[in-house]
Image (cartoon, rainbow, N blue to C red):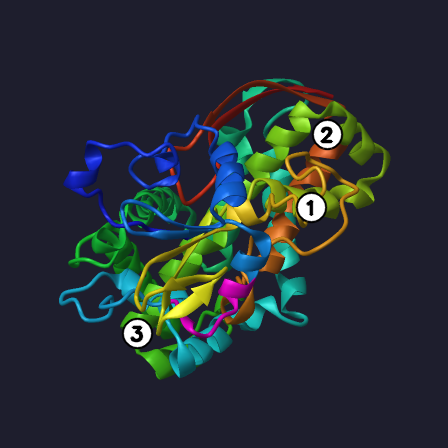
Amino acid sequence: MHNEPSSSPAFEAVRHPWQGIRAGAFEGAADTYAIHDEMRRRAPVWRAPWGDVYLTGYDLVSSSLANRKLSHVPPGGGTAEPSSAIRDWLIYQEGSAHTALRQALQQPFVGKGMAALRPVVDEAVEDLVGDAGQSGTIDVVAAFTRAVPEWVICRLLGVPDEDMPMIRAWSGSIRTILDAGFDEAFGGHGNPADEMSDYFVEHLRRLLAAGQVPPLLTGLASLVEALGLTAAGRNIAFLAFAGHETTVHLIGNMLFHLAHQPSQWSALRRDRRLAANAVAETLRLESPVQKICRWPLEPVMLDGQEIEKDDLLVLLVGAANRDPAQFADASRFDLGRAGKQNLAFGRGAHVCIGRALAEMEGTAVLEAALARWNTIEPVAARWMDNSSIRGLDALTLRLTA
């Protein structure tokens, strides 16, 4: 996800028409996609007055995600002392450190490992979606779109039920600081990511002492041996956060669009096999991760423009996934859409390791909703005020069995 520098006092007096995409200036109700469309037409590589460089087109964003001349690590991000636990997260590692860490964390997500995760997902969906009732008007975010992914990730990591409220609170705070700027996210020790990391360091210590191996920690012993307990705990905290936060918004965003398009809901009820299409189309149309950052290791040319070493590149994933050059009628939710892969989970060496789990959860919740409700109708919605993550704070629907 993206984190922009804090506002420049000199710039505050002049509000650019496109400033709405900027952290700190973002408003949840704003039509950021209209800004994306204009940027894509007029300036696909745009240097903002505040210094950041924004990329909007699918091809530009896709190629930049896999460009090894673009670093994942903020300049100077690893030198601050003391530094936040976020600095040790998988997404901010490169080279051999990234490879070793990724191999240790992704073991449960590959091959037959996913089969072991399915019963946990099914149990969470059955309990929590089932509790929503047969008919009525409810806020599905409060009822289950947040609770299901939280429940799943905590069970998969062996987190006790009584500690789940802490994970929710820490995750909300981390979501905020990651959107506030790298100075805050990478700054001195003491932010919510550090608190969450300290918790998981002790959690891993207890698991190792008891010889317990939760489903997502099959590589725990080798991870701790390779990184040490502190770095391992920090990355399990990252897995706990990233492993559910985007899934929360995938599910909510999907129900939002299906509630507004009853014909698509009806098509799903006629053919449940389309559930995977609905998940993919939601990831494209309403990408939970809207921004990903990169920094050139040397001057590079992008769309004919030279970008200097260490300039902050903001890859607008949400804009790329609505590029009409790649997706016909790109602003429409279409279960029958075919074409290029969306970029919601990134691309290249840093593609999201938990993609299969997120898709499994999204599909399972949708299948349960289709089996339970004949119709879903929109009543009210409130989008989060966050420029990096696209999701709903509340989504009230009228559900009819």
Per the image, is 386 magenta?
no
Crowd band around label 1 with a 10 angstrom C-alpha radius: few (<14), some (14–19), many (20+): many
State the extent of the magenta-drawn residues as a range.
63-72
Q: Position of residue 79 (x, y in %)?
A: 19, 71
- Residue type, numbered disc 1: Phe
Residue 29 to residue 326: above or below = above
Crowd band around label 3 with a 10 angstrom C-alpha radius: few (<14), some (14–19), many (20+): some
**Cα distance in 3D space between marks 3 and 2:** 44 Å
Q: Residue at x 82, y 32 (%)?
A: 267
Give the mark toward the camera: 1 or 3.
1
| Residue 125, image quadrant | top right
Q: Secondary structure at mark 1?
A: loop
- Residue type, numbered disc 3: Leu
Q: Which residue is mark 2?
A: 372
Image position of 377 (left or right of 310): right
| Residue 30, image quadrant | top left
